[in-house]
Image (cartoon, rainbow, N blue to C red):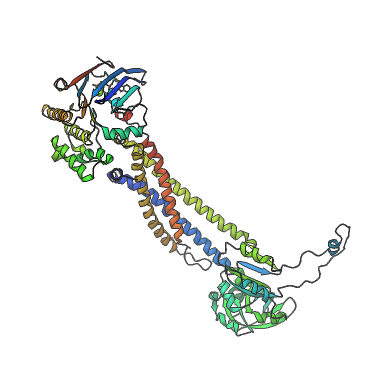
Amino acid sequence: MNDIILKVDNIVKHFYEPEKFQVLKGISFEVKEGEFLALVGKSGCGKSTLMYVLSTMDTDYEGTLTIKDTVLTNQSQNQLAAFRNENIGFVFQFHYLLPEFSALENVMIPALKLKKYAKAEIEERAYKNLEMLGLKDQALKKVTKLSGGQQQRVAIARALINDPAIIMGDEPTGNLDTVNTQIVFDIFRELAKERKQTIIAVTHDDDFANNCDRIIEMKDGQIV
Amino acid sequence: MFSSINNRISQIHLTSNVKQTIVAMLGVTFGISMYIFMTGFMTGVNDIQADLAFSALAHVRIYNDGPADNSNIAKKVFPNDLINVRNAKVIKYTDGIKNSTSILNTLSKQKDITGFTSQVNINVFFKNAGNKLNGLVSGIDVVSEDKVFGSAKHMLQGNWNELKYKSDGIFVGVELARILGLKMNDNVNILTSEGISRNYKVIGIFRTDVYNVDKTKAYIAINAARQLLGVNQDYVTDIQIDMVDYNNTQPLIDNIKAIIPYKVESWQMGNQQLVAGSSLRDTIAKAVSLTILLVAGFGIYNIMNMTINQKIREIAILKAMGFSGGDVTKIFLTQAIIIGILGGIVGIILGNIISHLVNRVKFEVAGMHHLPMTYYPHNYVFAFMFGLITTFVAGYLPAHKASKIDPVSILRG
Ligand SMILES: Nc1ncnc2c1ncn2[C@@H]1O[C@H](COP(=O)(O)OP(=O)(O)OP(=O)(O)O)[C@@H](O)[C@H]1O
Ligand SMILES: [Mg+2]
């Protein structure tokens, strides 16, 4: 039982603007520790909406979300924030970085918040992550001076910094060329295998999906 | 506590838009410097007013107020009977204070008194040749009179201490001297209400800058005054008392009223208009400067609100990465407090500079040369504290709003 790291049970979500509309229609599945999972489906079928629920950021849903044997549904925003900081690395569909900071600082910030390591060590790890993603020479640049693909890789480096139990990506390779897509894929693969970190990635890339451990396909707010 | 990453983010926010930070800071600076200048000026005016008033006025005065109403004595004995006394007269009562030595002994045991002096004041006519003027001769103890009223510094001509040795000497007010045409070493004749007349020699001329005093007053030695009236060494008409804190005369009055059989009066009782004027000025100064600080606070509130609206996406990202509402509040509150402290320090310096500049403006009235100003440290401390509190409140409201931002609703777009 305890190698199930994430479990959702009958998730239902509505949007009320501009009119009442059911986006997620009772979604249930389980993810094992160390599993590399792809979430696929047509544009508008509710993948991003589901990811926001899984990431604990969206609390406005029905059903239950359990991660690491902790029921997260109905926990307070501050409890969820602390949980996210430690356990979830998230790569947004649109790479959200802090524009006033350098690439290195963007990667370091979640770790400085968690304070598991000293600052010097965090900096070293951040450098290592950036190097792994081919960005070592861009580390001290402000993120607004980077290309779209470079920014997306900074966002991935940031998601990895706290060694989260689960890494979630909403089209993490959407802006990347084949070479970099392959690099990111290999990193994810290795993290899942070597460090038992769980990966859940939304993707439109068939090759990427086919090489994952499992594919979950969505259609109109349901799993098929 | 403020974790260092929160401080780092605050610092980046403050330095990435320096112009906006400075504008917010200037709001506080302006408020605090105006507060310092206003209160410095107003207390300066009050102090000058008090100085002027207390050059002729003691903090507490003991004198013989005349007897109680005894015109119908029979009524006191037979309160229930109807008694009618026609054309009642009050018999001559004793005036002045007869047993001054024992009262002075009592006073010397009181605390909070900085000095006291006895006077024999006589209403007289001053005469020189054909000119006649009605006024007041004050028989004084030279040393203690100066201690209580600082009278020696008002001397234009002559030496204050000389009165001690010359029982026929007199100091006259500068206006009195002008009207009667008196110069140093001239003789002036004094006529009391009892019809006694005597000549004195002008050995000094003074100016207090209170016109009425300068026009009607003269000093002679206290023993000379007793001689003039033909009374003994224990006789005085007034005992004038100076206190440590002139705003706090009531405790002393309560203490001695019961044991002294004469009227004990504080300056406040006799001069309600001075009390009112000084407290009204205080109120105006406080109201104006608090308004300024409040406006400055509103400015900070607006700028912080603006900053938070600009940074709403970054706040959402921070929260998505695991920053709590409290972290976000701290990040923005720290910025407000830094703005408050920096603005406050500059405000104190600027307020001090403005005060010095205004203090130099020429103002030649009533013995002043420049506009009055005070530099009391407690006013500076209060201005700084109030500035900090204002920024804290003005910063807290938007910061709290920022902490409530829901990250998904912002990031989903
Ligand atoms: N804030 C919102 N308010 C109302 N409706 C929304 C909102 N966000 C998304 N939707 C709707 O919900 C549905 C699911 O959107 P979602 O973003 O989850 O799609 P997606 O599967 O991620 O698509 P894509 O592959 O294009 O990213 C869409 O029909 C969309 O129009
Ligand atoms: Mg999407």
Q: Position of residue B94 (x, y in %)?
A: 76, 73
Q: Furthest-top residue in view?
A: A224
**In-image side of B106 versus B403 (left or right):** right
Q: Position of residue A196 (x, y in %)?
A: 19, 29
Is residue B258 among the parts visible in the rendering?
yes
Question: The N terminus of chain B is located in which quarter?
Answer: top left
Question: Would you place residue B44 above or below residue A92 in this image?
Answer: below
Question: The C terminus of chain B is located in which quarter?
Answer: top left
The structure residue drawn at horizontal position 50% and vertical position 50%, both measured from the top left corner, is B287
Q: Furthest-left residue in view?
A: A179
Is residue B135 among the parts visible in the rendering?
no
**In-image side of A154 versus B211 (left or right):** left
Q: In the picture, residue A170 is in which quadrant? A: top left
**In-image side of B277 versus A221 (left or right):** right
Q: Position of residue A64 (x, y in %)?
A: 33, 23
Q: Position of residue B315 (x, y in %)?
A: 31, 36
**B58 or B184, which is in the foreground?**
B58
**A173 or A114, which is in the foreground?**
A114
The structure residue drawn at horizontal position 41% and vertical position 57%, both measured from the top left corner, is B351
**In-image side of A135 versus B204 (left or right):** left
How many labels sit on residues? 0
Question: Would you place residue A59 above or below residue B46 in this image?
Answer: above
**B22 or B127, which is in the foreground?**
B22
**A219 or A86, which is in the foreground?**
A86
The quadrant of the rendered image in which ligand 1 is seen is top left
Q: In the picture, residue B194 is in which quadrant? A: bottom right
Q: In the picture, residue B133 is in which quadrant? A: bottom right
Question: Would you place residue B366 above or below residue B161 in this image?
Answer: above
